[in-house]
Image: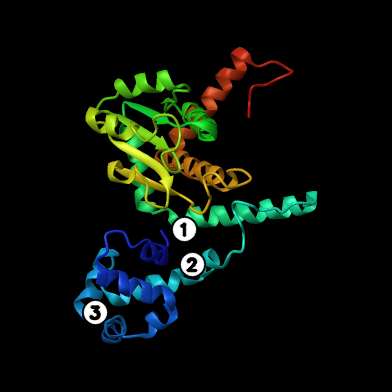
Amino acid sequence: MNTLLRLYRAEGFSEGERAVAAWVLRDPDAFVRAPAKSVASSCNVSQATVYRLCAKMGTSGIAELKACVAADAAEWRRLRETDVDVNFPVAPGATSSDIVGALKGEYEATVASTAALIDPAELDRCAAAIRAASSVDVYATSGNLTLAENFALQMAEIGHPVNVPTNEYTRNLVLANSAPDHLGIIVSVGGHGMNMAEAPALLRQKGTPIMVLTSADTTVFDEYADYLLRIAPGENFRQKISSFSTHLSALFLLDCLYTAVFTCDYEASLGKRIENQQLLYRYFGDERCAGLV
């Protein structure tokens, strides 16, 4: 995850650490140049607070944090300076050319924002959890359900079946039958949809590890998540043309998850996918439709 984005989120920071983070975000270049004593003085905190922040950021000290800030500053500025309105990317009277350009800009900004939110170490943990589970159950509704089904298709092609219940009753049964050796994956921007907010409580009761793909803003799922991937924030749940940004962000995360699982054993995954495609062609393909995608 982008260092400045982590400072912006300030998860688990004390009041003094938040003050330091806010100062860094206002002027990353000044932070990179300033000694620890000057940083502390500018923020009206102790130097110990500055060093505690460094530790919470997973760095060995202020020198390493400065290096991370310097490396990520350009990406942070691009993320902050985008003028894309994710809720209304086009205005009344937009031409087809306007629409193509506007959605191109929105998609580029969404992918950049989502990538900046991903912690590679967390993605590795998620892939390992999927591989270790005896059953992977994905809980999603509405447009996210289609994305979940696509993820299940990808996983089945490499020999890792994923269960995606498609109606409320079936979903509730799958939740009720969950177990500690299962993995529950919840895909929801903010807990919207039938019984989505209640799902993690039942999974926790069943002892099932929980992976959540949800908004970068605080959600009802955060306290339950054993594994957490963030969907790009910014969309208004009700006031928008469509869920262009959040759906693309969720798709990007699911594709990253699939690819992370795939590359855990690249040769075996590729071999299984090719074997399955050849079997499908042999038994179901014909000259009109080879069954290969």
In this figure, what is the number of numbered marks?
A: 3
- Secondary structure under the numbered disc 2 in the rendered image: helix
Closer to the chain start, of discs 1 and 2, is 2
Badge 1 amino acid? Ala
Q: Is residue 43 visible?
A: yes
Identify the residue at horizontal 28%, vertical 67% (top origin).
59
Task: For marks 2 and 3, give the CA distance.
Answer: 25 Å
- Mark 3 and mark 1 lie on one chain; the one further toward the N terminus is 3
Residue behind mark 3: 45
> Residue 148, how many percent across, how many down?
49, 32
Q: Is residue 154 left or right of residue 292?
A: left
Circle 1 SS class:
helix
Tell me: residue 129, above or below residue 73: above
Residue type of the residue flagged with mark 3: Val
Identify the element where label 3 is drawn: loop
Query: Looking at the picture, does residue 292 appear above or below residue 74?
Result: above
From the viewer's side, name the closer residue of 258 and 239: 239
* Disc ID at residue 76: 2
Residue at the image point whose x is 41% and y is 73% from the top? 25
Indicate left or right for 204 with 87 as reference.
Answer: left
- The front one of 99 and 227 is 99
Question: Could one spot residue 60 in this view of the protein?
Answer: no
